[in-house]
Amino acid sequence: MKFFKIWIQLTKPRVTTLVLVTTLPGLYLGTNELPSLSLIFWTLLGTFCMSSASFVFNQIIEKEKDAKMERTKNRPLPKGEISIFSAFVGGVFLILLSFLIFLRYVNWLSALCAFSGFLFYIFIYTIWLKPRTDQNIVIGGVAGCVGPLIGYAATTETLPLAAWVLFLIIFLWTPPHFWALAIFLKEQYDTANFPMMPVIRGIESTTKSIFIYTIFYSLSCISFYFVSSKMSWFYISFTFLFCLYMLYLAYLLLKENTKEYAKKFFFFSIFHLFMINLLILIDYSFHL
């Protein structure tokens, strides 16, 4: 049981679930017929393995800093429950398993998209940007945007405009989501010497950036209606309402500058991205 608990903490399956959710629309929208259950299963499993490997290597690299933060000090590596070597071997195994799944049951383009996300997350975000700039999540967030690309690649072996708009949606969602998290964990990031925006520029400046990004994120969600012929009034109507409420929360955070509103925005942003992808899938079902 302890073995499984350690690896659940290392691979962060709850976070990976959101990546899988963003992969599904591409799987369905990339074809005019329902993708096979086999293709869906192997694509999601390959994505899960590669995303899990990203979190394993992230925790290996940040072991010392994780030990300084209240939120992360009880992770397996800082507590010494698993060695760096064992975690490394497990991470490599997950990468190889992901490649094997994609190349055997899906296609090479989906494997390339997944591995590109891994490389970007580890080398561009974790190693280069995160310790050096408060804009780390803006550029580094690209790593979390590959889900739609993987989905479209799996069914079409191409990356059409609609795939890139979904990519853009997640790209614009990521900074305000993580900046909100950084606001109510500001002291912990400061202790660990991570140059997150609230630490470097202050909460007031951060809430302004959150509000601006939320506007562009909302516009990108709405724009998907115009680039996908498979979306109808159902998607655009509910998306508009959800975006309106998210903008309202961003405005309250901008006005009040409190950790309480940062938490509300943070958790709703997770729900919002989940609902956008769910709305796409539901609307697609209307066309079947």
Image: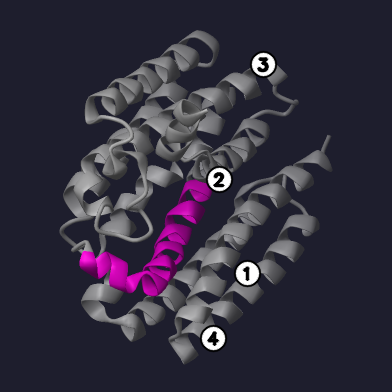
Q: Does label 4 or label 2 sit earlier along the sequence?
A: 2
Q: CA distance from mark 4 to mark 2?
A: 26 Å
Between disc 1 and disc 4, the foreground one is: 4
Tell me if I can see residue 192 in this picture: yes
Viewer-proximal residue, 48 or 158? 48
Q: CA distance from mark 2 to mark 3?
A: 20 Å
At label 2, the amino acid type is Leu
Q: Secondary structure at mark 1?
A: helix
Q: Say which residue label 2 marks.
A: 18
Q: Does label 3 or label 1 sit earlier along the sequence?
A: 3
Q: Say which residue label 3 marks.
A: 38
Q: Say which residue label 1 marks.
A: 243
| 184 left or right, relative to 24 | left
Q: Which x, y percent locates residue 70?
A: 34, 61
Between disc 3 and disc 1, the foreground one is: 3
Bounds of the magenta span? 165-191
Viewer-proximal residue, 29 or 113? 113
Graded by Cα atoms within 10 Å as few (under 14), some (14 to 19) or many (20 or more), the crowding at tag 1 reads many
Q: Secondary structure at mark 4?
A: helix
Q: Does label 1 or label 2 sit earlier along the sequence?
A: 2
Residue at 52% over, 80% down: 261
Q: Does label 4 or label 3 sit earlier along the sequence?
A: 3
At label 4, the amino acid type is Leu
Considering the whole magenta stretch, tell me its main secondary structure.
helix
Graded by Cα atoms within 10 Å as few (under 14), some (14 to 19) or many (20 or more), the crowding at tag 3 reads few
* Residues tagged 4 and 3 counted as in contact (Cβ below 8 A): no
Q: Secondary structure at mark 2?
A: helix
